[in-house]
Amino acid sequence: MAGVAGRRGWSRAPYYGWVVVGIGCLTGFMAGPGQSYALAEFTPHYEHAWHLTRAAVSGLFALATLAAGLLALPAGRLVDRYGSRRALTVTAVLFGLAAIVNGLVSTPWGLLGALFLVRFLGMGVLTLIPNTLIPQWFVRLRGRALSVAALGGVVGVAVIPSVNLWLMRLVSWRGAWELWGLGILVTLVPLGAWLVRDTPEHLGLEPDGRAAVALAGARNASPTPTPDWALRDMVRLPVFWRLLVALMVSSTISTGLIYQIFSVLARDGISAPTTAQLLGLFAVMGLVGTLGTGWWVDRWMPERVWAVAFGVMTVELVVLRYTTSVAAAALFIALFGLAQTMGALSSNALWPAFFGRRHLGSIRGVVLLAGVLGSALGPALFGWAVTAFHTYRSLLDVLIALPPLVGLMIWHVRSPQHRRPREPGSRIVPGPGLP
């Protein structure tokens, strides 16, 4: 290891993949201001600044999220074309500037544009890049690498809500946005440009931290590589659409809950500071789920782990439906954190495991679009429910039925590896030895 580092520079040492994972962790944290749980704390200020209803602000949020999702496909293709290093550097610069713009808006339409920028760049591209980059560096250890990178997002959930409340009291909600923008520009931009490398092959390495020269005599011990499916071939597979439906259901419920969580729990008598503190429990369970899920995914099928996550989501919704105390709210948030983390990690590991690494940027673009569609629908549903019925419980009665049905569907999906990806001008045919 020392020899490799000495001859080729420390960026070519076999362990360098874990440096890339560290940048993925930082990216997940810095994307936090564009996530639903952070934007939820700004909602009352938006309502007060422009005399808007909760449904109106939720509608602006939904429109911004939907517009951001429509650009997910070209964003994924650009990541494939130009590489994660360039994509991360450019996106981080734009996201920092977008955060500053959010502190300068003066009209509801300006707010819509500013929300679009932070949703597209933060929730969208900055989430897409690590989930495209890290699977390039890991195969056998992919679950654990993704779990370590996901710790940044877990810490963000624990820290950012309280930091936002503190910043708003200190410098107002506008000043909070501007400080976040400066923080992104001085940390993520230079570190991403300096440390990220697109693939291990570019450095003469192989995935999982093994030097190519050391691996040459042991290729039979390597896991069987996953065929690289092009997007045009994936859309012909029923399993692809089943996975997208599952992702949309998960995103609709999770984003709706996290965006409206302060309002939902307030109707059960729980104050905003208490909810912000309880979100620390979300992070604790997210940490447990992150470490456990990474290990579990590496030893079991990711689709089965994802199905279990839907089971946890079912219990989570039942608890929320009957929440009337801080203790019940704490249990709900703990289950929410566990389900969210298990679902995110297992689904992130599933796409490269099913469809390969070569076109992962384009694949993640479609995945992001499906997730964004769900993310746009969720807050709008919850906002409509509280405006129309003055309660969230009627909507919860309907949503509770969805996770068990989707979990059962995911439990029975199977990888399409037994079929060859189509070569240009050819048909998709069964693999060798299969009928």
Image (cartoon, rainbow, N blue to C red):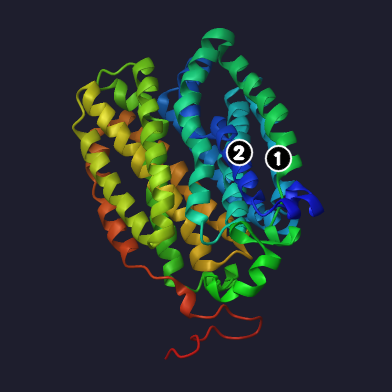
Kindly identify which numbered label has been placed on residue 71.
Answer: none
Discs 1, 2 touching: Cβ within 8 Å: yes
Q: Residue at x 31, y 63 (%)?
A: 411
In percent of width and height, residue 418 lies at: 47, 79
In percent of width and height, residue 95 lies at: 67, 34
Mark positioned earlier in the residue sequence (1 or 2): 2
Q: Residue at x 49, y 67 (%)?
A: 354
Picture quadrant where residue 347 is located: bottom left
Alpha-carbon span between mark 1 and mark 2: 8 Å
Residue bearing mark 1: 192
Mark 1 packing: few (<14 Cα in 10 Å), some, or many (20+)?
many
Residue bearing mark 2: 27
- Which of 425 and 206 lies nearest the eye of the viewer? 206
> Which residue reaches farthest top?
170
Picture quadrant where residue 313 is located: top left
- Which of 67 and 12 lies nearest the eye of the viewer? 12
Q: Secondary structure at mark 2?
A: helix
Q: Amino acid at mark 1?
A: Gly
Q: Amino acid at mark 2?
A: Thr
